[in-house]
Image: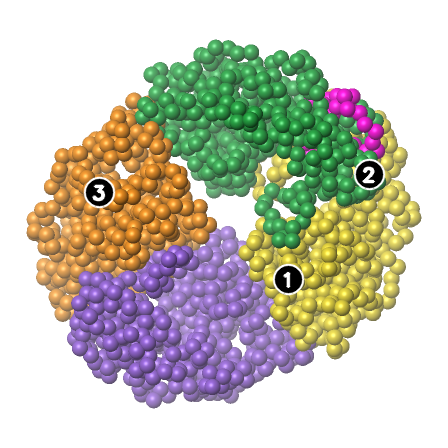
Chain colours: A green, B yellow, C purple, D orange
């Protein structure tokens, strides 16, 4: 759960990259980093927190040069340290290189053990460092050769931006194409981004997706396309980007995210209709599905929960504590909308169930007569090992409880999820989901997992 | 454009007040302050910025005591200094007292000149300091007497929270009742707030409005009500609180803000219908009116503009500047919603016209075939002198331009405003607006303006 | 215990004032403030902490104009709040004025009560605000008249810098001349400062002292001198400035501070000789006296205690605490100097005795065979009410203990103080100290104390 | 120019290490770092700036465990980045290990190239990382074996503290013993430090030096001594530690630093006598030598230059700039000491000459009749490649100018340096300096330089 951005051949590379990263802020809030190249030297600035906090005019001024790559990192427990903030910079026999990675390698543990045995040292707990070591060990003379040598060994999800000290920018997408990566054009320069919404902000033109298994190199002479020297795989795009993760104004895999979510709401209304007075979303991510549900059902749509714009910081809770404090700071029910009403709440996911439970209780507190919860995706039963930061299986309430049990826990009057088929149709693929990875809903992992992942899965089954 | 909050008789007074103020954050982002009383001593903490930035655990720990008042201040050009941050604390013959003020006095300049002539010194540029000086000069022996002596002299809008060093909390609302002020109960303690949304966050119960011209004193024995010793006035509640300023989940003057805004959208659809494919709001404040417009017109509602959650900080614009940069950081069009469509955009106000112009252009850039702008309020033609921070008259585009001219400037295909009558009906009062101040739309100022205000108005007419 | 600075008629007034204040940093570390005037407007920047922390390029850029005054405040317990940071700015019938004060008024409490009774409000706990209120109440038409009317009423120590919004800078020194205040010239501009060391830093030329009872006004036409319209007093310059407070490179009352301290050490060697192997100072303030003692006695001088340059911040002490932690962080004994030696330690004061005790023990820990403590001033028996922040009488160890008792507490082998006569001769005045205030050593207060001060004194006697 | 510290077996390891590092602050002010071990996990905190700024209670609380090592880094141009802040932490086949290094390797460039060729990647520009890579490549099974394998390859100056995740602390000093490293005891725990002054602050007992070529391992069973498996070298202790770098209250190579400096001053007075009225030091480092000069010559010692305690931060210089601004902020002449006098100024080094020139001019400005400069060390003619951050040879004024030329540039009336023999005698070794490295004064480098160093030297000769 990260975002990558790159720009090649622009007089204000760092400044544009900083804006492009801002548009990807929803993909991670833990750390932000930028690396720019000038005169054979890579310069790095990384900081914890949001892009707007991490960079000011002074920090950007320390990043001269016409090419830059950036990275946004999601907050994950335990490894939240500055030294894990990307893009990484390292020096090796090929010169200096910087790398930004969105995704997750499933065989990183095995490769790391092998590399350490041969004398490699590791300074981060990131799987990304494995790629770098493999490149350094490669005998191939040029960066494309080294990169291919490394990618031959790794398995999993990786959308990469690389930048070399001789001003090559490289975009890579794994053979399955789990995470998105798109190419754009801003005047005479090329841009790379996890999502097209970056291009809208900086007024760049969307050119095309990087294909699964493709390496694109940007250098003075322009842009050249290469195939990863690894066996081709059928694409398995991540369906969760469409369901939840990407921004609604982005195109992912050339499909409108907003429209897919709205169709999920429509499908959900067909699959799980209920008598109600009002359809309300859990803002902001539930809005398109709730609009779809409302359209399909004919039940009026209202913004029955107001989302605060001022949350994000640590808040100090009184000792005499407030019920549902965390949710309440972020969401407030509109009493005049829900009081005395049969309320249908549409959300895009239900992971642990704790937040949904608080929302249901808060709505009842505001007078709702009935609360029906509709989730615009199937039950999340399995963890993702390809780069989405889902909890372990034992924390996923749907991994071990029936829909009925979850509904009882959440204290709603009724609970329903969208079917897998419904979701796939809404996203715009075949109902069986060919070409997509939906392992988080099915447990069908398209790329063989590593040992440590399998251990985690097995433990949860006990 | 400020918010006030108070709590009397709670073990964690400062901490609760801090949360109450957070819920009022939309009323001002310039500065935040808290004053608490313990053992006859008033302690103050003020800081520039948001509540969550201004206060941490250490700052709250410096505010012991069971009663506290807080203030949120809106950023206004020129006087943005820490010493203007409220609540003010001062010592005088009556002991020590603290004051937090929402509103604006129209005869502050005259009173200040008079007070300075008699030897008073001023340390802020705030009109609020005038009230304090008048209290200090009063011969009456007790704080109610001193307060009444002061309020007899001032004219304009004032919703006040005061706190004395002998632990009296006082709530005051001017005879016209311009700004809201409500009483709530949290277990054994009383709370005051500009809006009911504070009560929802801290789980307090809404009791009632403070009446126009009422003074309510909270002390050990409970709560007592008094009349301001000034001539009664017919109430002239501020209509702009309903149209734009208050939070949609609040009740203002005991009316749902959300519902009024939705009805404004409905009325607007009746008054200014147009053929279109989609109705989209300018989020977040335009959402209820857009839903109303959609319901009434039958044209589908969509979230065609996405609002970023990460704006608020200073952003560094590239030198090779981006068109509509400021708006673009905050709002992004969803191409899949607007491309090729006749788009009806609903917003709740159009002040200078510059933002609307950028939105229109941005929507066309995203493919909109037609852009029709609908404003869910009448044209803003006059500045407010009662506490809303509107620009001077010469900056109000509607003060000097016809709707047609504005539409041309904004470059939309059609522009329409809600009528005054329509707005008043939607708010839920008589169509002529009795009991409400709508001077910003009409120029009919219910309380005689001061000299300096009149000069400003006259200048704009030239 | 504060410092004041002013500059009139310089293109970079705020920047020069900031440097001038830096040179006065030893006079106070609690807060620093600057006020500059431009176009009839006074602008203020104040902050807690050191000058170098309080001001950066941005803060200075907010203070345009060709005249500015500054203030350094000493940290005193209890009232350490930003709102007490000077220079104060206020508006009154005479326009706007700013004031910076070094000293202390003895009748502030009485005057404050009187002013509050007549309707004045106070926003700080500072005695300085009283002067401002008295000016505001004055009927005299011009600022000199108002100032004189105020000064007629106050009693005590005050060296003032004032700055008006019509660009007059005013320097005032009370009739007794307790605190220093000097005039300098920097190219075409005039400067005021508590000490001449400011002039050396900014390369200004020292012109003269402001005389006791003199008011000097700087305006376009130049500099004019006036007498305070209060009864003349014989001067009673503060001897403690010479003994301890001023910087050794300053001239105070036109006498070299360094040379006076060296002579104190010489006198001390004559009055209290002792056999020893080495004379060491408590750095930095004890250095000149130790050099004097060494010269007179012929016993070699060494820097047997090293002062750390990196102290000043809060340090975190381990729970398993270190003996003499606070002193140890600041001072380290040089074992090779003191080991096996009879050490004579020269310090300039002994207030509570706790620090001296720690130093003696630390020196013994480093091997000193004998430790003889010599104080280059008489015992401090009385608190100062004229602006030096001494502890209350009950905390002054010499107020209630004999020299012998103190020596036993401090655990030194011998203890001796300089006589009053010796000190006065060293400073360069008549042996009986005519023209100087030495109340802290004698209890002879030259200006009648106020009620609250007398109460404090009486209590300590019990 | 760095400092290292370590503690093994103490309940408050991080807190004690933080204090120990504070005592080494004079060895570097760029960055400070700490690594502690608990439960097989190494935790790191590093920050730019002083120890007291880099660590607060929260940061120390994040470093639980009973063993910790720390590092202080000097500011060197160009590589002042957080990622170069030590101690480094890395994971390798041997587990996890942390390293702190004082010194400089002369063959780092060659080794780095070799390591990169074999697939190693580098994340810092530090020579220290080379040691780590060599350890990771070693086939030896235990940490001592790996360390020895690495040290066999490196050449130059290294005093190291290492800490392993199984709670071994290791101290290492290169065969030449360039940089100091001492062992102490604090109750039941062992401590390591660059200088004994750390032990005085934390009340630890000095046990002994780590010998040149010795590896000392601290683990549960106690402390064991080993020889570096590299050819023994005759010791060449750095004489510059005695002359300038170490704190005067430290013992270095078991000799008092203070006493050596005082003897240098005495020797200088014998070698370069001059008629004068007063001897003044450039504080603080010149003080002992000036005392020695005064004693030997009989000319009185005075503190004729006052050093400010408040410098260290960036200061903003006015545009209309002040002569000798940088020096003036730090040092002020005492006019009453120097006015009309023949002043002998004693300093411990003269590197570029620019500062000395400013001091001479400042003293003349304060009235000095003559200014004679005496340097208590020989001319610095060659850069150090063993860990002292001297400028390149082309910036060393003595590398290309005669003493007479330098004196003319500095504008003093006479200039003299201490002879090499005099310095060596003062330090307490044989006059020819056997057992010491004085390459900075002679160009005789005891350990063969690397290619890049030689290139730099040669270039300067042209």
Q: Is residue A279 magenta?
A: yes
Number of numbered discs: 3
Quadrant including the C terminus of chain A? top right
Q: Tell me: residue A105, above or below residue D55.
A: above
**Callout 2: residue from which chain?**
A
Q: Quadrant of residue A52?
A: top right
Q: CA distance from mark 2 to mark 3?
A: 76 Å
User: Nearer the observer, disc 2 or disc 3?
Assistant: 3
Taking the spot 80% from the left edge, 55% from the top edge, the residue there is B207
Taking the spot 32% from the left edge, 52% from the top edge, the residue there is D20
Q: Tell me: residue C226, above or below residue D5.
A: below
Taking the spot 41% from the left edge, 46% from the top edge, the residue there is D64
Residue, disc 2: A369
Relative to A21, is A377 on the left or the right?
A: right
- Label 3, secondary structure: give it: strand
Question: Along the line of sight, which residue is nearer the eye, A385 or A68?
Answer: A385
Relative to A368, is C127 on the left or the right?
A: left
Q: Is residue C138 magenta?
A: no
Question: How many C-alpha atoms fall within 10 Å of the one at disc 1: few (<14), some, or many (≥20)?
Answer: many
- Label 2, secondary structure: give it: loop
Residue, disc 1: B35
Residue, disc 3: D224
User: Nearer the observer, disc 1 or disc 3?
Assistant: 3
Q: CA distance from mark 2 to mark 1?
A: 40 Å
Tell me, yes or no, if residue A284 can be seen here.
yes
Q: Quadrant of residue B346?
A: top right
Point out the residue furthest to the front here. Answer: A462
Q: Where does residue D86 sit, x and y in percent of width and height?
A: 34, 41
Tell me the magenta residue range.
Answer: A260-285
- Label 1, secondary structure: give it: strand
Point out the residue furthest to the left here. Answer: D431
Quadrant including the N terminus of chain A? top right
């Amino acid at each position: 759960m990260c975002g990558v951005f790159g720009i090649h051949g622009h007089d204000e590379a760092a400044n544009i990259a900083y804006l492009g990263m801002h548009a990807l802020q929803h993909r991670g809030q833990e750390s932000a980093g930028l690396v720019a190249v000038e005169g054979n030297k890579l310069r790095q600035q990384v900081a914890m927190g949001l892009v707007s906090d991490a960079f000011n005019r002074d920090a950007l001024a320390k990043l001269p040069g016409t090419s830059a790559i950036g990275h946004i990192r999601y907050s994950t427990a335990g490894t939240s340290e500055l030294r894990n903030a990307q893009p990484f910079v390292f020096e090796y026999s090929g010169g200096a290189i910087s790398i930004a990675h969105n995704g997750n390698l499933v065989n990183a543990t095995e490769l790391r053990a092998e590399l350490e045995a041969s004398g490699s040292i590791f300074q981060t707990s990131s799987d990304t460092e494995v790629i770098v070591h493999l490149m350094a060990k490669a005998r191939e003379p040029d960066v494309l050769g080294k990169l291919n040598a490394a990618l031959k060994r790794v398995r999993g999800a990786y959308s990469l931006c690389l930048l070399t000290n001789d001003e090559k920018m490289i975009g890579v997408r794994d053979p399955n194409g789990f995470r998105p990566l798109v190419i754009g054009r801003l005047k005479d320069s090329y841009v790379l981004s996890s999502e097209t919404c970056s291009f809208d902000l900086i007024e760049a033109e969307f050119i095309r997706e990087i294909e699964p298994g493709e390496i694109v190199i940007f250098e003075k002479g322009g842009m050249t396309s290469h195939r990863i020297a690894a066996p081709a795989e059928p694409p398995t795009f991540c369906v969760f980007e469409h369901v939840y993760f990407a921004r609604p104004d982005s195109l992912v895999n050339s499909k409108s995210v907003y429209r897919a979510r709205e169709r999920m709401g429509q499908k959900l209304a067909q699959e799980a209709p209920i008598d109600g007075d009002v359809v309300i979303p859990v803002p902001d991510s539930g809005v398109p599905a709730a609009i779809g549900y409302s359209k399909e059902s004919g039940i009026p749509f209202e913004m029955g929960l107001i989302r605060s714009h001022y949350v994000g910081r640590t808040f100090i809770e009184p000792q005499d504590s407030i019920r549902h404090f965390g949710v309440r700071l972020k969401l407030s029910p509109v009493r005049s909308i829900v009081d005395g009403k049969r309320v249908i709440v549409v959300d895009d996911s239900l992971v642990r169930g704790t937040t949904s439970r608080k929302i249901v209780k808060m709505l009842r507190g505001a007078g709702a007569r009935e609360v029906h919860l509709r989730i615009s995706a199937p039950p999340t039963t399995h963890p993702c090992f390809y780069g989405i930061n889902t909890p372990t299986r034992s924390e996923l309430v749907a991994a071990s409880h029936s829909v009925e049990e979850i509904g009882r826990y959440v204290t709603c009057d009724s609970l329903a999820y969208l079917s897998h088929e419904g979701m796939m149709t809404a996203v715009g693929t075949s109902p069986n989901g060919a070409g997509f990875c939906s392992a988080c809903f099915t447990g069908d992992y398209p790329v063989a997992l590593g040992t440590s992942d399998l251990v985690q899965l097995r433990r949860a089954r006990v």
